[in-house]
């Protein structure tokens, strides 16, 4: 084993996993990630940092596994002996969690428990300290109890996904208090980027704007446009995850911008940025509504700012524009390669 700090990331192929990997590699870490076997490539977001593990300079390694498979999680943990574990893996789509509640809960809630159990046993057997980050969500606040939401605001989850995240949150605290595990909960509000999954509302909109301006799409079908979210930039948010694990004591932190905007406002900035009017292109489709909606999220990150010295670096308007620009550039590149265009 090298003397470098080793980290293990579940969900390394996701938006946050890819940014966190880049961040940790820059800090000099050896980064290990768990990927799911898939019949097609699922490593798009991390291909640019992958180096053949046979090369001496390789510090980035991938291992097949799944949060629903506890034996493999244990084996990987024992093999890697990481000092830090970031649990980002999840079926993370709120609407989909209503369609697949059992699978969502198995991954999000039971998956976290499996990982915590593996860490507990590993730590007990070897005496090696492991620092654990749990990817908690503002969705746990759900139905509005207090505005803005902070670490002490009561949870009122409104989806199978967020119920599972509440379980994982409390289990993380329980392992901290029961087994002296250095375990932190981040309660992260929505964070977006050009790497955001294409079915989340922000990326769905910016991708559609790019395709509409390229003449590839005429309409975009959306659900509830009145919901309000506190949207930040994913790159800023992975920095907060790491900062949590560098403190003297484990704790829980809200990461947010303290600004809230509706889907309509997002649409307005995205379409206006390319000289279009969103009302000309947006249609309603009830299939995108949720059985129970979260109407208003706005976070109070005072504790995180004060204790971790964390600040967001990108404004809402900048975020929308950088996502639109990125989708337009990506489409332009595809066009030049002659893919998907007649
Ligand atoms: P993504 O949906 O982009 O990524 C999810 C990751 O989890 C992917 O790597 C996915 O693999 C992996 N995964 C899914 N199911 C399993 C499984 N059964 N076993 C192992 N891995 C699995 O999410 P984000 O990067 O946006 O979010 C990261 C984490 O933070 C998630 O836990 C999410 O719930 C949470 N979160 C996200 C917020 C956000 O705004 N982005 C806000 C608050 C919390 P694959 O690529 O193969 O599908
Ligand atoms: P969210 O993100 O549910 O907040 O969860 P999403 O982008 O899916 O929805 C945000 C809001 O937009 C409304 N909406 C639509 N949503 C989608 N996906 N598609 C549509 O067509 C559409 N039309 C309107 C939704 O109803 C909702 O109000 C994200 C995920 O990353 C979670 O994993 C994370 O925990 C939370 O953010 C914080």
Image: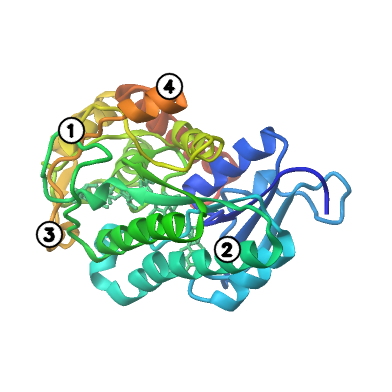
- State the image coordinates of residue 118 (x, y, percent, origin top left): 57, 68
Question: On screen, 229 above or below 40?
Answer: above
Nearest the viewer among 264 and 57 is: 57
- Name the residue at 35% across, 42% down: 188
Give SS at disc 3. loop
Point out the frontmost of discs 1 and 2. 2
Residue with the mark numbered 1: 148
**Badge 1 local density, few (<14 within 10 Å), some, or many (20+)?**
some
Mark 4 Cα shell of 10 Å, populated few (<14), some (14-19), many (≥20) = few
Task: Residue under label 2, please give it.
Answer: 119
Give the CA distance from mark 1 to mark 2.
34 Å
Of callouts 3 and 2, which one flags the residue occurring earlier in the amino acid sequence? Answer: 2
From the viewer's perspective, is the residue at label 4 or at label 1 nearer?
1
> Where, by quadrant of the figure, is residue 164 drawn?
bottom left
Q: Residue at x 10, y 44 (%)?
A: 145
Quadrant for residue 148, please give it.
Answer: top left
Quadrant of the rendering where the N terminus is positioned: bottom right
> Does dot 4 land on a helix, a strand or a loop?
loop
Image position of 253 (left or right of 336): left
Which dot, 3 or 2, sits closer to the camera? 2
Return the residue found at the far right. 56
Q: Residue at x 36, y 50 (%)?
A: 136
Q: Which mark is residue 313?
A: 4
Separation of disc 3 and disc 2 at Cα?
35 Å
Name the residue tied to disc 3: 292
Q: Earlier in the sequence, mark 3 or mark 4?
A: 3
Marks 2 and 1: in contact by CB < 8 Å? Answer: no
Q: Is residue 296 visible?
A: yes
Q: Where residue 36 sits in the image (x, y, percent)?
A: 56, 68
Viewer-closest of 301 and 90: 301
């Amino acid at each position: 084993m090298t003397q470098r700090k080793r980290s293990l990331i579940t969900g390394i192929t996701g938006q946050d996993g890819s940014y966190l990997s880049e961040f940790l590699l820059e800090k000099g870490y050896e980064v290990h990630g768990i990927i799911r076997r898939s019949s097609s490539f699922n490593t798009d977001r991390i291909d640019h940092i992958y180096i053949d593990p046979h090369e001496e300079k390789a510090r980035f390694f991938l291992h097949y596994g799944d949060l629903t498979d506890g034996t493999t999680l244990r084996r990987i943990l024992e093999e890697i002996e990481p000092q830090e574990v970031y649990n980002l893996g999840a079926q993370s789509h709120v609407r989909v969690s209503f369609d697949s509640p059992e699978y969502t809960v198995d991954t999000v809630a039971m998956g976290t428990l499996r990982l915590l159990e593996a860490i507990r046993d590993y730590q007990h057997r070897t005496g090696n300290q492991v620092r654990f980050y749990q990817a908690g969500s503002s969705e746990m606040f759900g139905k509005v109890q207090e505005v803005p939401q902070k670490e002490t605001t009561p949870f009122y989850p409104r989806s199978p996904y967020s119920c599972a995240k509440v379980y994982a949150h409390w289990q993380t605290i329980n392992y901290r208090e029961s087994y002296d595990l250095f375990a932190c909960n981040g309660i992260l509000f929505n964070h977006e980027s050009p790497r955001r999954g294409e079915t989340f509302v922000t990326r769905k909109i910016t991708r559609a704007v790019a395709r509409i301006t390229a003449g590839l799409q005429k309409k975009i079908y959306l659900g509830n446009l009145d919901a309000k979210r506190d949207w930040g930039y994913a790159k800023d948010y992975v920095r907060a995850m790491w900062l949590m694990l560098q403190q003297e004591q484990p704790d829980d932190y809200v990461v947010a911008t303290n600004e809230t905007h509706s889907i309509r406002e997002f649409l307005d900035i995205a379409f206006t940025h390319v000289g279009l009017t969103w009302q000309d292109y947006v249609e309603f489709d009830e299939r995108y509504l949720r059985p129970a909606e979260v109407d208003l999220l706005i976070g109070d990150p005072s504790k995180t700012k004060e204790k971790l010295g964390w600040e967001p670096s990108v404004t809402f308007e900048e975020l929308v524009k950088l996502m639109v620009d990125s989708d337009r550039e990506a489409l332009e590149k595809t066009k030049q390669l002659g893919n998907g265009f007649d």
